[in-house]
Amino acid sequence: MAITITEKAAEKVKSVLQEKGKPGAALRLYIQGGGCSGFQYGMSIEDAPDGNDKVFEQHGVKIAVDMKSYLYLNGSQIDWVDSLLGGGFKINNPNATSTCGCGHSFSAAGAPEGKPCH
């Protein structure tokens, strides 16, 4: 399987990379502990992916994922969603067994539980 990105999200990533003067850089997608559900998503700009990363390319955008994160993100899709309050990236993760109301954290089977949402 792979990590995919929608065309709309890819255009947003390319725009950000252009603004930062790094048109050839990759988007790093990762998870870290925390959030209401145990894990939270993170994104950053990566000048040169690590040799141990899984790297995917779609719609002219490179996506780098470290191996630990890939275990929980395999099969996910990065999308861009417009709303009344603006827009933002959304991760559609088939491995998430539950998500927080904010949509930025998730839990997965066999993973430690997070803190309750308040």
Image (spheres, grey):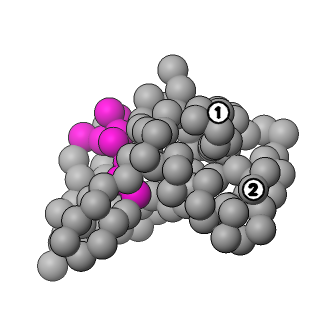
Q: Position of residue 6 (x, y in %)?
A: 43, 39
Looking at the image, which residue sits at the far top? Answer: 1
Q: Position of residue 77 (x, y in %)?
A: 42, 38
Q: Is residue 37 visible?
A: no
Residue 14 occupies quadrant? bottom right
The residue tagged 2 is: 23
The residue tagged 1 is: 56
Q: Nearer the viewer, mark 2 or mark 1?
A: 2
Compute the Cα span from label 2 to label 1.
16 Å
Which residue is pictured at 78% across the width and 51% down the height? 24
Q: Is residue 5 visible?
A: yes
Residue type (three-letter) at the residue carrying disc 2: Pro
Residue type (three-letter) at the residue carrying disc 1: Phe
Q: Would you say 33 lies left or right of 37 here?
A: right
Residue 93 colored in magenta in the image: yes
Q: Would you say 40 lies left or right of 43 here?
A: left
Which residue is pictured at 56% across the width and 55% down the height? 13
Up the image or down, 27 lies above or below 21; here it is above
Residue 105 colored in magenta in the image: no
Q: Which residues are magenta?
A: 89-97
Instruction: Give the mark, 2 or 1, whose residue is nearer the N terminus.
Output: 2
Determine whether the residue tagged by mark 1 lies in a helix, strand or loop.
strand
Determine whether the residue tagged by mark 2 lies in a helix, strand or loop.
loop
Crowd class of label 1 (few under 14; some 14 to 19; many from 20; radius 10 Å): some
Which residue is pictured at 32% across the width and 33% down the height? 94
Q: Position of residue 40 (x, y in %)?
A: 41, 60
Crowd class of label 2 (few under 14; some 14 to 19; many from 20; radius 10 Å): some
